[in-house]
Image (tube, rainbow, N blue to C red):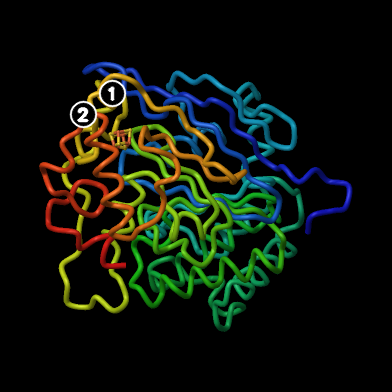
């Protein structure tokens, strides 16, 4: 639990850039990203594959060897980007736990589940084996594995997909971390098990008081859990806001596009509206706003001038990197039309294309206007 004297801010990442030299050129995976996580709170990081969300968090814990990195990542006041390997090893697992997306490949098939949890415990605390074994049973029981004392010596293949993911969460919690990074923790699971794992994560957070960074490509996953949401695209932050603002007052057309691509209650049987086009190459990202090739509100200025992350009026935690007027938030047809007019006034083609949704669909005003 968060102590009275502990500072609220647990992790503060400032102007992080990460690039990887390859034979085709420099892959600019993360380009000047800043974010913060408070103790006991959840930050959701959302974006399509290749948006830089996983690279940003893996860099914080020193898992992107060979990358060119700049910026700062202050964890409990210490910059992890300049920490030695030995210092990082003390932080990983003990203070920052990680859950990866594929529980089958993350668990070693050759070793028993309990043994792998014991290893996580004994890597940091030199406790006797019997004590580590008891801890493994307790942890499996904590994450809801039935008959944990009997299942602790099972092999990973004897666990179902949901149980394996629970075991991964147990391993990440082995040393009572103050921050849990969950990278697409439910992608490989069916929707029922997905909901169970998310509920479990929330329950454990309430019980243990840890902060969580939940990384996902699906805005629906964090609809009930995130306190703050950061939308990433092409290695940059497009929009950041509290959960309610992201869902009800989005400003950035990319955020609107992600929302429009979710199934909506009351619209069963209708076609989903995907964000048209593909994310750009990070070796040669577009100049200006990285999203302009996919954005039907794009104006000539968007192609040349990168929009800064600007705070929305009257809000201290909502900011958007888009040249559209900042007051144009929301998902109604009125907002879509106002964006079209603003785009046209800036020399864009939105009105002549008769665009919809907000991210670039030309399938009528279905997306946002239908909300
Ligand atoms: Fe980017 Fe311009 Fe579209 Fe805003 S309107 S998302 S700045 S292309």
Displayed-image quarter of ligand 1:
top left
The residue beneath circle 1 is 301
**Closer to the camera in the image, 248 or 37:** 248
The residue beneath circle 2 is 347
Quadrant of the rendering where the N terminus is positioned: bottom right
Q: Are marks 1 and 2 in contact (CB under 8 Å)?
A: yes
Residue 321 vertical placement versus 244 (above, below): above
Residue 255 vertical placement versus 223 (above, below): above
**Closer to the camera in the image, 22 or 199:** 199
> Does the beta carbon of the residue at mark 2 sit less than 8 Å from ligand 1?
no
Kindly tell me whether residue 347 is visible in this rendering. yes
Residue 280 vertical placement versus 181 (above, below): above
Locate residue 185: give its quadrant: bottom left
Please state if 127 lies on the left or on the right of 65 as rendered: right
Residue at image coords 54%, 32%: 34
Q: What SS does tag 1 mark? A: helix
Q: Residues within 10 Å of mark 2 (few under 14, many from 20)?
A: some
């Amino acid at each position: 639990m968060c102590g009275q004297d502990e500072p609220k801010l647990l992790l503060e990442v400032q102007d992080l850039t990460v690039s990887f030299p390859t034979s085709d050129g420099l892959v600019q995976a993360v380009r000047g990203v800043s974010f913060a996580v408070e103790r006991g709170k959840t930050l959701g990081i959302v974006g399509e594959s290749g948006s830089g969300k996983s690279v940003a968090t893996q860099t914080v814990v020193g898992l992107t060897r060979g990358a060119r990195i700049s910026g700062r990542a202050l964890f409990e006041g210490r910059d992890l980007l300049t920490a030695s390997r030995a210092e990082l090893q003390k932080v990983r697992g003990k203070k920052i736990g990680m859950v990866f997306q594929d529980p089958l490949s993350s668990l070693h098939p050759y070793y028993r589940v309990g043994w792998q949890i014991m290893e996580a415990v004994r890597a940091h605390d030199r406790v006797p084996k019997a004590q580590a074994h008891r801890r493994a049973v307790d942890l499996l029981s904590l994450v809801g594995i039935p008959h944990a004392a009997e299942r602790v010596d099972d092999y990973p293949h004897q666990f179902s997909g949901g149980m394996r993911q629970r075991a991964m969460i147990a391993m990440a919690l082995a040393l009572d971390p103050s921050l849990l990074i969950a990278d697409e923790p439910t992608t490989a699971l069916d929707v029922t098990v997905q909901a169970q794992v998310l509920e479990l994560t929330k329950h454990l957070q309430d019980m243990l008081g840890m902060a969580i960074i939940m990384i996902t490509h699906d805005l629906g996953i964090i609809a009930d859990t995130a306190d703050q949401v950061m939308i990433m695209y092409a290695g940059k932050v497009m929009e950041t806001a509290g959960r309610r603002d992201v869902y009800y007052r989005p400003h950035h057309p990319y955020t609107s596009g992600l929302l429009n691509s979710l199934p909506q209650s009351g619209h069963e049987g209708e076609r989903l509206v995907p964000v048209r086009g593909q994310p750009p190459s990070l070796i040669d990202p577009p100049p200006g706003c990285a999203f302009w090739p996919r954005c039907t509100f794009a104006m000539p200025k968007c192609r040349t001038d990168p929009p800064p992350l600007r705070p929305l009026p009257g809000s201290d935690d909502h900011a958007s990197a888009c040249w559209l007027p900042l007051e144009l938030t929301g998902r109604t047809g009125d907002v879509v039309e106002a964006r079209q007019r603003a785009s046209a006034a800036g020399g864009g083609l939105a009105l002549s294309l008769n665009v919809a949704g907000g991210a670039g669909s030309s399938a009528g005003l279905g997306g946002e206007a239908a909300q």
